[in-house]
Image (cartoon, helix red, strand yellow):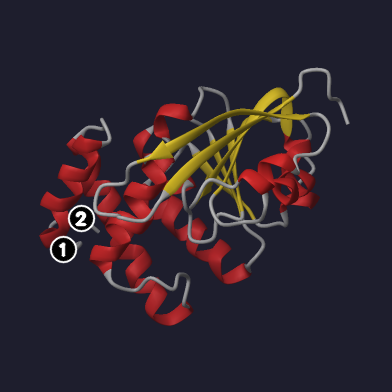
Amino acid sequence: MTVKTALPALLPELEAGLLALGLPTALAPRLLDYLALLERWNQAYNLTAIREPREMVAKHLLDSLAMHPYVGAGPLADLGTGPGLPGIPLAIALPALSVALVESNGKKARFLREAVRNLGLSNARVIESRAETVAEPGAYQTITARALDRLAGIVAVGGHLLVPGGRLLALKGTRPDEEIADLPPGWSLAGVHRLTIPGLAAERHLIVVTRDAADTA
């Protein structure tokens, strides 16, 4: 599949969004190839409730990529990634980043494996498992979660995957002060960043939570 057949009308809009996020427009063809694949599979498997491709550009691609300045160099695990969000857009945008796509739903995991193969994402792999049963303690510098749970819930199921000092990047809508206050011992708020998503009027915040270096639980 190439961008010549993959939703070409959306190319200018996606390129403008990438520029607004400080990313190169050269990423647009592969991102649209991913979107075309997702659209095709979504017709049969209902992988995402958002079905209109133009909506997917802002609500899936650009929303995921808005966190790219906060992603470090170390390996990243995307928990409850669903159809690969934000993991696949980040893997496309950051080819030096090693990304594990963690998803327990079999249909979604099959799509993820096809997307990784089809897009040639040598820096991404699929782990078909619930986050809490992934037996890779301390293997990741970063974990991401886009629509998984409250902050304490994400920490409970996926915190073991982080090295001490590693970070959780959680995409939220409005600023979740109550969730922040409920963080368990051993976890500290490192930052709250209000994100501007091109084409999306909804409020978005990136919550950065750090696993304390002394925490070895």
- Residue appearing at x 16%, y 63% in the figure: 5
Residue 88 shown left or right of residue 98 in the figure: left
Q: Residues within 10 Å of mark 1 (few under 14, many from 20)?
A: few
Q: Is residue 186 above or below residue 28?
A: above
User: What secondary structure is found at the residue carrying circle 1?
Assistant: loop
Q: Position of residue 116 (x, y in %)?
A: 45, 51
Residue 68 shown left or right of residue 26 in the figure: right
Residue at label 2? 2
Find out whether the residues at labels 1 and 2 contact each other: C-beta distance under 8 Å.
yes
User: What secondary structure is found at the residue carrying circle 2?
Assistant: loop
Q: Considering the image in quadrants, where does the C terminus appear?
A: top right
The disc placed on residue 135 is none
Residue nearest the viewer, comparing 83 with 70: 70
Q: In which image quadrant can residue 106 be found?
A: bottom right
Q: Considering the image in quadrants, where does the N terminus appear?
A: bottom left
Residue at label 1? 5
